[in-house]
Amino acid sequence: MRRIWMNRLGVSTVIANMLMILITLSLAAILVAWAGSSYGAFAGGSQLFFQQRGQALQENFVIEEVFFEKNTTGQIFIFVRNVGVININIAAIYQNGTSISSYKFSTCGTPPSASIGVSQVCEISWVPPDTWGSDGGSSTLWNTGDIFNLVAASQRGNQVATTMRGP
């Protein structure tokens, strides 16, 4: 009689181990299915991100020259050259950290749709804001020796900066 009892214990141990393996595998399958759906949603968004960054890496531009016009308007002119392999659109111009809202393109169209083609140079001009104060009644808004930190930003998020001193 003792021998039959031992055989039953062996059968129930094997069945218990099989049930534990089956439960573990089913939980692993559920975890893989959940992680796969979550990763799929993430992968779709990251694909768009990396595609846009790839285009941004092909975009390259430089500020070639800055001119200060000392007349009644006191305009500042910058010349931006596209040295990348795709067209760029200038989205914003910053002067000393302040966004310039009234800039105009002389050769590339009108903002914000002005496009600078590959190897093309575009002239951008504006009158600086009156945050400098006037130099004792002068008609210009900048003085000789003023420091200008100029930043041009594209629609894809690239920026190019230069620091100039007024003549």
Image (spheres, helix red, strand yellow):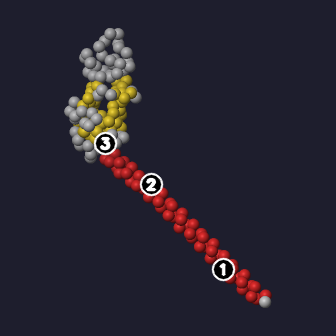
Q: Which mark is residue 42?
A: 2
**What crowding class fits label 1: few (fewer than 14 Cα within 10 Å), some (14-19), or many (20 or more)?**
few
Instruction: Give the quadrant of the N terminus.
Output: bottom right
**Residue type, numbered disc 1:** Val
Q: Which residue is mark 3?
A: 60
> In this rendering, which labeled residue sits more in front, label 3 or label 1?
1
Query: In the picture provided, is 60 more to the left or to the right than 16?
Result: left
Q: Nearer the viewer, residue 152 or 103?
A: 103
Q: In the image, is residue 18 above or below residue 44?
A: below
**Residue type, numbered disc 3:** Asn
Q: Which residue is at the far top?
A: 137
What residue is at 33 percent from the left and 28 percent from the top?
101
Residue 81 in view of the camera: no
Which badge, 1 or 2, comes first in the chain's sequence? 1
Residue 47 x %, y %: 38, 54
- Count of labels in the image: 3
What residue is at 27 percent from the left and 45 percent from the top?
86
Tell me how far mark 3 sits from mark 1, CA to CA: 68 Å
> In this rendering, which labeled residue sits more in front, label 3 or label 2?
2
Residue 30 in view of the camera: yes
Q: In the image, is residue 41 above or below residue 113?
A: below
Which badge, 3 or 1, comes first in the chain's sequence? 1
Give yes or no for contact between labels 1 and 2 (Cβ–Cβ under 8 Å): no
Give yes or no for contact between labels 3 and 2 (Cβ–Cβ under 8 Å): no
**Residue type, numbered disc 2:** Phe
Q: Which residue is at the far right?
A: 2
Q: Nearer the viewer, residue 150 or 17?
A: 17
**What crowding class fits label 2: few (fewer than 14 Cα within 10 Å), some (14-19), or many (20 or more)?**
few
Q: Which mark is residue 94?
A: none
Residue 97 x %, y %: 40, 29
Tell me how far mark 1 sits from mark 2, CA to CA: 42 Å
Q: Which residue is mark 1?
A: 14
